Amino acid sequence: MARKQAKYIFITGGVASSLGKGIAAASIGLLLKSRGLEVRMQKFDPYINVDAGTMNPFQHGEVYVLDDGAETDLDLGHYERFIDINLSRHSNITSGQIYDAVIQRERRGDYLGACVQVIPHITDEIKSRCRMIASQDENVDIIITEIGGTVGDIESLPFLEAIRQMGLENGRENTLYVHLTLVPYLNTADELKTKPTQHSVKMLREIGIQPDILLCRTGKELSRDIKKKIGLFCNIPPEAVIENIDASTIYEVPILFHHELVDNLIVHYLKLLCKDLDLGKWKEMVQKVKNPTNTVRIGVCGKYVNLKDAYKSITEAFVHAGVPNDARVELVWISSEDIFNDGPEKYLSDVDGVLIPGGFGERGVEGKIKAVQYVRENNIPFLGICLGLQCAVIEFARNICGLENAHSHEFNAETPHPVIDLMDSQRKVVRMGGSMRLGSYPCAIANGTIAHRIYHKAKINERHRHRYEVNNDYREQLSQKGMVFSGLSPDGSLVEMIELPNHPYFIGCQFHPELKSRPMSPHPLFTGLVEAALKYRKLNRANKQ
Ligand code: GLN
């Protein structure tokens, strides 16, 4: 039987960054998946880094880790959450990877004396990464590829040239170009302005790409006249000019796109054979996100609290966890340095639960340790993720086991009690990129623990990104004083989860549960924290009355 021809949708962005290209791509993916099509997602990032792992979250937002250990752009998180699939490293391609592959080939002599150039060698490599996804899986119907950056950037030009060629080579009936732009509203003129969109499309057309669909990000509804005007100037039928209006939750975007007939347009343009849309369950979830009965306040105590993108997956995991708890989870971002300077009482006395996320570097660590002590002593529900678990172990070692100056070797190489230490395999590591303990690992959960009650499972798989571990030399002392090692690597050599049984909810995990939370299947550790926080809030309220 002839192989089915995979079709390609390319998503570019214009005018400004942060318009929600990743969410738009993910929303289109969800719509097509809900019409019964096999969808794969991919992002091209035009920076030179080989992956996002070495970038500061301040600049680039969180590093999203996949099952296979790839350290990727945070948009991959949106793709996984919306489409409910597990992606692989082939889904995030950077200029660094493309150039690396081409240069290695050149050194091997594979180009037979040719002068190696951006066109065709770099563009060919980009195209082959696009096609690789279809060649690996013959069931794929649609590959949605988002091009990072904004049209007009110098660095994204080879990617745009490559996708232009893809259209030519695959045929227009197999290729669709979707362009996301901004239609700003000017207060002084009391008008929506179309010129930035016109310019952005003009720039794309100069490169040789005529967009088929325009997604117009806007704060106000687009009238039929505005759509007509944009269509006329951009050479697009007005029905393909789509209003992409600000939504109260990102999970509503696919529903709004469907109202604008986006999926019908795509099905029509690409001549896709598929069923009608069924978004019933997704709509129910969105309703619950928008109209919860309860509210709960969770303090997130971290270092990058001014840049919420640094904790994107955590924020989303709390939205998901609110759904089964019928609660709006209000996140209170607290700088761990403020906690250190002013004491925890000031910041933590009016939250119903606390989360300490992962992190690197010494700044703010003592504040996190103080926060752990406060929540432990005041029975405030607590979840510590990665560095959060490590801080919980340090605090317990110092204040309960009496191990003075206990610390992590990461922050104090001279500590007399390195309760958190480098794994043996990490001692020899000199390269920074891609060398942590990365990706999905199994974990065995002990019977009779809170972790077991929460997961309802004896074996789980969770994603990791760290170098340090609980030091096994201190396990005995810690457990004698009441710390329970509820999750271990299957061979028992690594501590993956800790808990305190005499506390309503005190859990630490060495892995990152937020990376596996999905809106339709919230992560049990987050759901459990929100549930415990709701109980704490009710109890606390009753006590205060
Ligand atoms: N810095 C710690 C380590 O490398 C924790 C990492 C994290 O929180 N992701 O082990």
Image: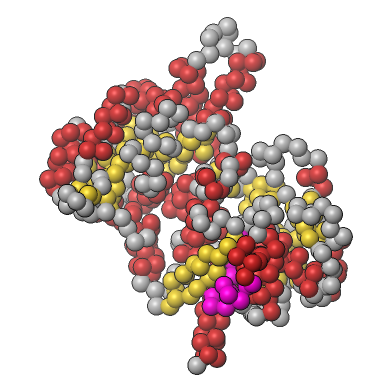
Q: Residue at x 15, y 39 (%)?
A: 229
Q: Which residues are magenta?
A: 343-357
Residue 454 appears at what percent x and percent y?
A: 61, 71
* Residue in front for this viewpoint, 304 or 541: 304
Q: Residue at x 32, y 45 (%)?
A: 274
* Residue in front for this viewpoint, 419 or 35: 419
**Is residue 203 rendered to the left or right of residue 489?**
left
**Is residue 408 rendered to the left or right of residue 282?**
right
Residue 29 higher or lower than 281, as above or below: above
Within the image, what quadrant is residue 380 found in? bottom right
Q: Residue at x 36, y 25 (%)?
A: 164
Q: Residue at x 64, y 54 (%)?
A: 359
Within the image, what quadrant is residue 453 found in? bottom right
**Which residue appears farthest toward the front when viewing the image?**
341
**Which residue appears farthest toward the left when viewing the image?**
225
Residue 428 visible in the shown view: yes
Q: Is residue 371 magenta?
A: no
**Is residue 514 rendered to the left or right of residue 480?**
left
Residue 126 appears at what percent x and percent y?
A: 48, 27
Residue 222 visible in the shown view: no
Residue 189 appears at what percent x and percent y?
A: 17, 49
Residue 459 higher or lower than 275, as above or below: below
What count of labels does the image hold?
A: 0
Q: Quadrant of the N terminus?
A: top left
Residue 138 higher or lower than 364, as above or below: above
Q: Is residue 353 magenta?
A: yes
